Amino acid sequence: MPLPLRWQWKLNRWRERLAALFRPAEKPSRPRLCPACSTLVGATASRCHECGASLNFSLAAATRSLSGLIPSETPVTYFMLGLNVAMFALSLMVTMRFTQGFNLAGGIHPRVLMRLGACLPDIFQTSEYWRLVMPIFLHGNLWHFGFNAFVLLDIGPQVEAEYGSARYLFLYVITGIGAFLVSSWWGNFSIGASGSLMGLVGLMLAITYRRGGNYMRMLRAQLVRWIIYIFIFGLFFRADHAGHLGGLAAGFLLGKIFADREPMNAGERKRAYALGWFAALIILASFGFMLKNYFTAG
């Protein structure tokens, strides 16, 4: 016997309400912001009409998301500083375990630096090219670390503001690699961020030649004097002059190639983000090889 129409209607209504509990509510289509450049785009668009980035996933959006984790207008500089702090703390702890002592101002043991990735004279024979990257984050003692950290915080934000964070990361890593290539070819055992820092000086020096004007001439004179002071200072502390020259030359040449401004259009932004992620992958791979070497070395 069929149910009365009234009960059938109530039963159907209850069934619809129960189904609605497990069905996602339909949201009205609204315009949204591009995750890469923050331009307002249509609700049905799959790409940003301004920068061309995909609204589902793009390197630009991923870069902005990661840089947002560091509350700063120059996140890469502080990220590099953080890596330097972490690696100095790690090398200090390993040295303490190796020597059974604590000496904060003292030097890191050479065997520890070798296991963590110091640049070696025979790097071309051993093909351990990750040793061209890891020394950027290694320092021999507290004074070495402190001086380079001070210079990084002084110069880094200026260069990052000029070139944009993504290209700055690429330039920082590549000038460091250039510095340790020259150092290894010269036959040095080398560590330190100073090769990359000299690369930043070379970039700024290239900017002064490109822009011209009285202020740029004054800045260039200051940079040249600063370079001379570094080399004189290095005479008393066995600095790696070959690495310094390599980083300076690499930075100056790259400064002639790269536009001294942030990316302006969609094409430039894509290339900049690609370079930044390429540099990040180089760093990540180098840390992976370092860990493998650390746990397998005798």
Image (cartoon, rainbow, N blue to C red):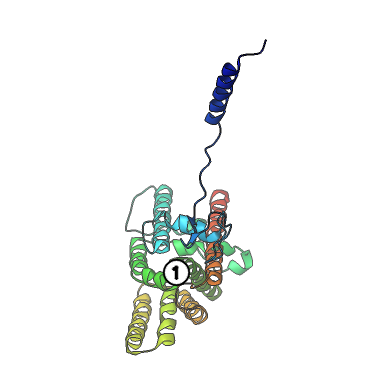
Seen at 56% across and 71% down, the residue is: 267
Could you tell me residue 187's position as x and y percent? 53, 73
- To which quarter of the image does residue 71 belong? bottom left
**Picture mark count:** 1
Within 10 angstroms of label 1, few (less than 14), some, or many (20 or more) residues?
Answer: many
Tell me if 240 is positioned left or right of 178 in this view. left
Tell me if 109 is positioned left or right of 222 in this view. right
Could you tell me residue 209's position as x and y percent? 42, 87
Task: Between residue 31 and residue 295, name the one nearer to us.
Answer: 31
Task: Between residue 258 and residue 198, name the one nearer to us.
Answer: 258
Whether residue 243 is visible here, answered yes or no, is yes
Hey, what amino acid is under mark 1? Gly
Q: Residue furthest right?
A: 1
The local secondary structure at tag 1 comes to loop
Whether residue 189 is visible here, answered yes or no, is no
Q: Residue furthest front?
A: 5
The quadrant in which the N terminus is found is top right
Task: Between residue 70 and residue 200, name the one nearer to us.
Answer: 70
Seen at 42% across and 52% down, the residue is: 90
Could you tell me residue 189's position as x and y percent? 49, 67
Could you tell me residue 79's position as x and y percent? 42, 59
Tell me if 37 is positioned left or right of 216 in this view. right
Residue to which mark 1 is pinned: 164
- To which quarter of the image does residue 126 belong? bottom right
